[in-house]
């Protein structure tokens, strides 16, 4: 009887765990505009030597651009922990949402400063950052 009660309590707990959602829901690019800390919601691979794991903390630095002749917004963030401060990269394309034509540009600068190039038409889509620490 004791074993049956333990099993039933385990089964009762399973739906509660399964229904929980990850608090690391990506914010829209358009919402990344305030000074503060943002966390990666997915791995950000730069090259075979440099990669930032999910949950990496980034300081917001600046957002510029949008409109005009070049309809691109530039989001600049810096990793708080920088294992390779001399690393840099050319611009590379990534597609965090998986949608057709939804690529963004990513460029690594010294001291783990990363510049994201996001077309104006894509700023309403989910980014790869959240302000949630959970």
Image: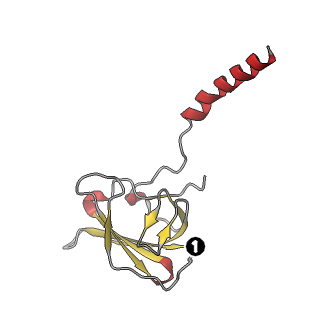
The quarter of the picture where the N terminus appears is top right
Q: Position of residue 107 (x, y in %)?
A: 37, 75
**Which scheme is used to colour this image of the protein?**
secondary structure
* Residue drawn where x is 31% and y is 64% of the image: 104
Looking at the image, residue 4 lies above or below residue 116:
above
* Residue drawn where x is 32% and y is 76% of the image: 91
Q: Identify the image quadrant of residue 70.
A: bottom left
Q: Position of residue 27 (x, y in %)?
A: 44, 54
Using the image as rendered, state which of residue 75 and residue 43 is in the foreground. Answer: 43
Residue carrying label 1 = 80
Q: Identify the image quadrant of residue 109.
A: bottom left
Q: Position of residue 24 (x, y in %)?
A: 52, 51
Q: Is residue 36 visible?
A: no
Q: Secondary structure at mark 1?
A: loop
Using the image as rendered, state which of residue 96 and residue 60 is in the foreground. Answer: 96
* Residue drawn where x is 33% and y is 54% of the image: 124
The answer to whether residue 82 is left or right of residue 98 is right
* Residue drawn where x is 56% and y is 77% of the image: 82
């Amino acid at each position: 009887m004791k074993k049956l009660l333990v099993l039933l309590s385990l089964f009762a707990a399973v739906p509660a765990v399964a229904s929980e959602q990850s608090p690391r829901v990506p914010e829209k690019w358009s919402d990344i505009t305030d000074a503060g800390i943002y966390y990666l919601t997915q791995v950000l691979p730069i090259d075979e030597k440099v990669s930032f794991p999910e949950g990496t903390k980034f300081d917001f630095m600046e957002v510029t651009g949008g409109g005009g002749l070049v309809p691109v917004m530039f989001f600049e963030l810096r990793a708080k922990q920088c294992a390779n401060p001399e690393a840099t990269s050319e611009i590379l394309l990534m597609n965090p949402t998986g949608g057709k034509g939804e690529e963004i540009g990513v460029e690594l600068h010294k001291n783990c400063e990363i510049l994201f190039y996001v077309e104006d038409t894509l700023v309403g889509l989910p980014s790869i950052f959240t302000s949630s620490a959970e």
